[in-house]
Image: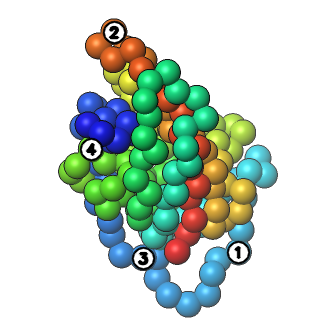
Amino acid sequence: MSRPLRFVLAAVALAVPACGGGGGGTTPSPVTSSGGALMPPAGTTTWAISYRAATASTCPAQTPDSGMATMTVDPSGTSLVLTDQGSSLSGGGPASIVFTRDGSGRYSWADPSGLATISFRFTTSSHAEGEANRLASPSSPCSATWPFLLDRQ
């Protein structure tokens, strides 16, 4: 595939369809976990994913497509599901990625086959920053790291 992150996630059959936004009205105030880390409010909201050029790469690496996604956060904030609209996180078809939060407030996912990792941290309840990593393997010795931003719409 021509887009590196799509390649990585397609290899593990991931993608993410979009749902509607998270309701109307007021913007929820920032929510913190018991450890004080910022997290988004529970429920389903629409987010923009904006990728930056690779900060590290061992092969020709195109910046993945930016796009829209929905995020569904459980009431405790310990996990969330990020579902894209067939753009940046998907390999061409819908699927969902389940992220878990560690003790420091970082949400992360690792491909079971070891081909990719994605992690991010919320800086406000409506903005997160992170990186997606394509890891080298025997069949594809290339690797790359792409910073990205998530912004609630």
Residue linked to disc 4 = 91
**Percent of width and height locating residue 124:** 71, 63
Which numbered mark, 1 or 3, is in the foreground of this view? Answer: 3
**Percent of width and height locating residue 60:** 43, 30
Report crowding for label 3: few under 14, some 14 to 19, many 20 or more residues within 10 A (C-alpha). some
Q: Which numbered circle lies on residue 29?
A: 1
| Front residue of 85 and 35 | 85
Residue linked to disc 3 = 21
Give me the C-alpha separation between circle 1 and circle 3: 17 Å
Q: On screen, 141 above or below 105? A: above
Q: On screen, 32 above or below 108? A: below
- The residue at the point 56 percent across, 48 percent down is 52
Mark 3 / mark 2, whichever is N-terminal: 3
What type is the residue that disc 4 sits on?
Gly
Which numbered mark, 1 or 4, is in the foreground of this view? Answer: 4
What type is the residue that disc 1 sits on?
Ser
- Of helix, strand and loop, which one carries label 2? loop
Mark 1 / mark 3, whichever is N-terminal: 3
| Front residue of 44 and 83 | 83
- Of helix, strand and loop, which one carries label 4? loop
What type is the residue that disc 3 sits on?
Gly
- Classify residue 122 as left or right of residue 21: right
- Classify residue 12 as left or right of residue 5: left
